[in-house]
Image (cartoon, helix red, strand yellow):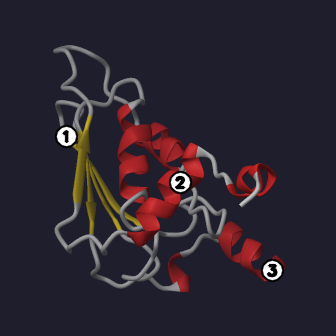
């Protein structure tokens, strides 16, 4: 193989990470990601809207629609101490980014000021359907 053809097939670290995640076995139904640190006593707790705005920055790389508008986030529970628990799903049990999206969601939410420990649980019930998508996301699909 020539040096030139090697260069043309090299992939970025991000692409390598996604490819690796796509080849991993499907996470079990108890898949959970926990990130962040407890808030200091008296620290102002983030609003639910701030958490949702953070979740809107995470997109499914295959569809390029954010996880909130896709309807993948089922529940957000904020605790009095600033901790956040999120239940989310993916479009199908065979989704190649099932092991990636919950971690990305936990990361962006844990970076919101006023959020303590974030736990994102991957759930399968109820199963995701197109009806869960926002009107904006449905319009995006109509363009394709």
Above/below status of 137 relative to 128: above
Secondary element type, mark 1: loop
Q: Residue at x 80, y 80 (%)?
A: 144
Is residue 90 at all visible to an observer of this figure?
Answer: yes
Residue, disc 2: 16
Q: Residue at x 53, y 43 (%)?
A: 53
Is residue 57 at all visible to an observer of this figure?
Answer: no
Residue, disc 1: 79
| Callout in the foreground (2, 1) | 2
Q: Position of residue 5 (x, y in %)?
A: 77, 57
Label drawn at residue 144: 3
- How crowded pointer 3 is (Cα within 10 Å; few <14, some 14-19, many 20+) is rated as few
Above/below status of 67 relative to 12: below
Q: Nearer the viewer, residue 63 or 50?
A: 63
- The CA span between labels 3 and 2 is 27 Å
Above/below status of 57 relative to 43: below
């Amino acid at each position: 193989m020539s040096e030139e053809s090697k260069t043309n097939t090299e992939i970025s670290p991000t692409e390598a990470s996604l490819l690796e995640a796509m080849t991993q076995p499907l996470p079990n139904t108890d898949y959970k990601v926990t990130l962040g640190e407890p808030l200091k006593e008296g620290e102002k707790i983030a609003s639910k809207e701030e958490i949702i705005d953070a979740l809107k920055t995470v997109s499914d790389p295959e569809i390029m629609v954010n996880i909130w508008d896709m309807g993948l986030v089922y529940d957000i529970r904020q605790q009095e101490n600033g901790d956040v628990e999120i239940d989310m799903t993916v479009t199908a049990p065979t989704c190649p980014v099932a092991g990636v999206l919950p971690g990305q969601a936990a990361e962006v939410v844990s970076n919101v000021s006023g959020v303590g420990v974030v736990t994102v649980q991957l759930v399968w019930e109820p199963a995701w359907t197109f009806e869960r998508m926002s009107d904006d996301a449905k319009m995006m699909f109509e363009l394709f």
